Image: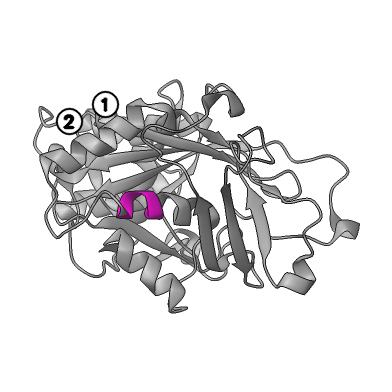
């Protein structure tokens, strides 16, 4: 979700309507999360590391909702297919690769592929984990429902750990994603600080939140329950609309301040900080981020400062 400033002379007269989208944070047994590296030539999120996801597609997703979108996009972008443990036999690698290519190219319906193999997408395993809406000044806007899913609780086809998977779909002779890999949240944050990767503010925010929970090299029942607690509580219901801080001189400071609901400038109590300092690169992705959040996300979210979660 880009948050870079744009030239006022090129801004549209009316903000673009945010497109409904979904993104899933897949957590494996080693407390690593799946990140995909976007192609530098992509129209959205160019060269950034993001969680797999994409826009709701009426033809592909129909009435199934954004949880279905999340699982479809995860399969298209990474090859990882999350299905209900009671589903039928998983197709061969060759069948999965072929279906992935055709679904991505809109030559096959994801639901038809699932039905053919008696597979049921494991939508019930997806835990809501905040919604983010791109600021009005950005030309391409999204209203994204983020989810968390634990890989060891689902039957899954595709790679589940390790550094990199490069067998990614290449429809129309190009790629939206150039690699996918599992990495610990803390390592991803350190790679951003070392200028090895680029992240957008929502990904940084959610990685920072998970880094405080998913510690150590083995995912535990206690850690999963803490993530579920966040999902069921006020955190999971947050709808975040980043806004630039009025009066902040970006050119002088060298960074932009994005405030979130619950900040003292956005309906929160005096002294409450819920904002990020963001240093942007030329394509809108953050080259560095510093999150300021001085409250406990488990127990101290001021829900009155947030809008009612939207039905996407």
Which percent across, then down, holds residue 41?
57, 69
Q: Residue at x 91, y 59 (%)?
A: 9
| Res. 180 visible in picture | no
**Which of 42/253 is in front?**
253
Main secondary structure of the magenta stretch: helix
Marks 1 and 2, how far apart at CA = 9 Å
**In the displayed structure image, the side of residue 27 where residue 105 appears, left or right:** right
The answer to whether the residues at label 1 and label 2 have Cβ atoms under 8 Å apart is yes
Query: Horizontal placement of 9 versus 282: left or right?
Result: right
The span picked out in magenta is 207-211
Q: Position of residue 48 (x, y in %)?
A: 49, 65
Q: Position of residue 303 (x, y in %)?
A: 52, 26
Q: Is residue 260 shown to the viewer in this render?
A: yes
Residue at which label 1 appears:
124
Residue linked to disc 2: 84
| Residue at 47 percent of width and 32 percent of height | 301
Measured from the top left, where is residue 25 in percent x and y?
Answer: 34, 47
Relative height, residue 301 to residue 3 (above, below) = above
**For residue 279, above or below residue 59:** below
Q: Nearer the viewer, residue 269 or 123?
A: 269
Q: How is the image coloured?
A: one colour
Report if residue 270 lies within the magenta region.
Answer: no
- In the displayed structure, 250 sits above or below 135; it is below
Please report the residue visible at 19 percent of the width from the left and 45 percent of the height from the top: 151
């Amino acid at each position: 979700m880009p948050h870079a400033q744009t030239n006022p002379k090129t801004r549209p007269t009316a903000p673009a309507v945010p497109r409904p989208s979904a993104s899933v944070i897949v957590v494996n047994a080693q407390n690593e999360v799946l990140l995909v590296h976007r192609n530098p030539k992509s129209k959205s999120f160019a060269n950034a590391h993001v969680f797999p996801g994409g826009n709701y597609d009426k033809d592909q997703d129909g009435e199934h909702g954004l949880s279905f979108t999340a699982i479809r996009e995860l399969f298209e972008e990474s090859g990882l297919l999350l299905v209900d443990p009671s589903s039928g036999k998983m197709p061969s690698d060759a069948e999965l690769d072929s279906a992935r290519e055709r679904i991505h190219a809109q030559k096959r319906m994801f639901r038809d592929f699932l039905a053919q193999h008696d597979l049921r997408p494991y939508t019930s395993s997806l835990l809501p984990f905040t919604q983010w809406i791109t600021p009005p000044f950005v030309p391409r806007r999204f209203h994204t429902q983020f989810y968390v899913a634990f890989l060891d609780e689902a039957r899954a086809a595709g790679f589940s750990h390790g550094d990199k998977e490069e067998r990614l779909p290449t429809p129309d002779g190009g790629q939206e994603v150039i690699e996918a890999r599992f990495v610990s949240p803390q390592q991803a944050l350190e790679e951003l600080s070392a200028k090895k990767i680029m992240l957008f503010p929502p990904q940084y925010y959610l990685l920072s939140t998970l880094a405080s929970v998913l510690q150590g090299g083995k995912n535990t029942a206690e850690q999963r329950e803490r993530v579920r607690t966040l999902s069921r509580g006020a955190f999971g219901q947050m709808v975040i609309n980043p806004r630039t801080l009025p009066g902040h001189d970006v050119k002088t400071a060298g960074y932009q301040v994005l405030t979130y609901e619950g900040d003292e400038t956005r309906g929160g109590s005096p002294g409450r900080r819920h904002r990020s300092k963001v240093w942007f690169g030329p394509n809108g992705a953050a080259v560095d981020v510093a999150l300021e959040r001085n409250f406990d996300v488990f127990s101290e979210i001021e829900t009155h400062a947030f809008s009612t979660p939207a039905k996407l």
